[in-house]
Amino acid sequence: MPEYIDNLIVPCGSGITLAGIIVGCHIFNKKVKRFIGIQISGYDRTKEINEILKRFDIKPNYKFCINDTYKYSKKVNATVASTIELNKVYEAKAYEYFLKNKERIGIKETEKSLFWVVANNNEFMSN
């Protein structure tokens, strides 16, 4: 992970991964200006995330965006750098939302933003 990031964007289902990343960055003193969680199927997971952060005595300091464009089960195709296929359930939906809503979220083109790739398990999913 780079030494400094303005925006760390994380696809979210339950929110546990986002909470874990925030805790890890806190423990390892990573410099992240803003954490942004993009929930991929319309559910507000801030309560669950805040409960996890509270266990580590970390004040919630993140932006949570709720994307209700797709149902959870809908699979979406997306690639990064024309060769890296994103996970069809989580990453592709969140990445699409991120690209379409950068300005609304408050992300400037001049900022250093990192999109967290959770895991591509497309080959294990049935179509």
Image (cartoon, grey):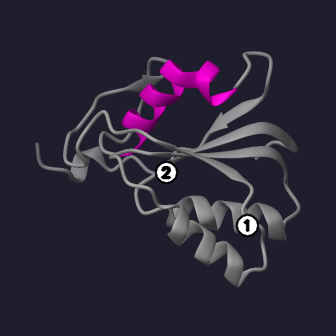
How dense is the environment of label 2, judged by Cα within 10 Å: few (below 14), some, or many (20 and up)?
Answer: some
| Residue range highlighted in magenta | 90-106
Q: Quadrant of residue 69?
A: top left
In the current view of this chain or complex, which residue is farthest to the bottom? 55
Q: Quadrant of residue 58?
A: bottom right
How dense is the environment of label 1, judged by Cα within 10 Å: few (below 14), some, or many (20 and up)?
Answer: few
Place of residue 22 in the rendered image (x, y in percent of width and height, measured from the top left): 70, 61
Residue at the spot x=27%, y=32% of the render? 76
Q: Which residue is mark 2?
A: 118
Residue at the spot x=33%, y=39% of the render? 68
Place of residue 74 in the rendered image (x, y in percent of width and height, measured from the top left): 20, 40
Mark with earlier residue (2, 1): 1
Taking 119 as reference, is 2 above or below it?
A: above
Q: Which residue is mark 1?
A: 24
Q: Secondary structure at mark 2?
A: loop
Q: Secondary structure at mark 1?
A: helix
Q: Nearer the viewer, residue 102 or 77?
A: 102
Q: Main secondary structure of the magenta part?
A: helix
Q: Nearer the viewer, residue 58 or 112?
A: 58
Place of residue 88 in the rendered image (x, y in percent of width and height, measured from the top left): 30, 39
Residue at the spot x=28%, y=45% of the render? 122
Residue type at tag 1: Gly
Q: Is residue 105 magenta?
A: yes
Q: Is residue 99 magenta?
A: yes
Residue type at tag 2: Val
Q: Nearer the viewer, residue 30 or 57?
A: 57
Q: CA distance from mark 2 to mark 1?
A: 15 Å
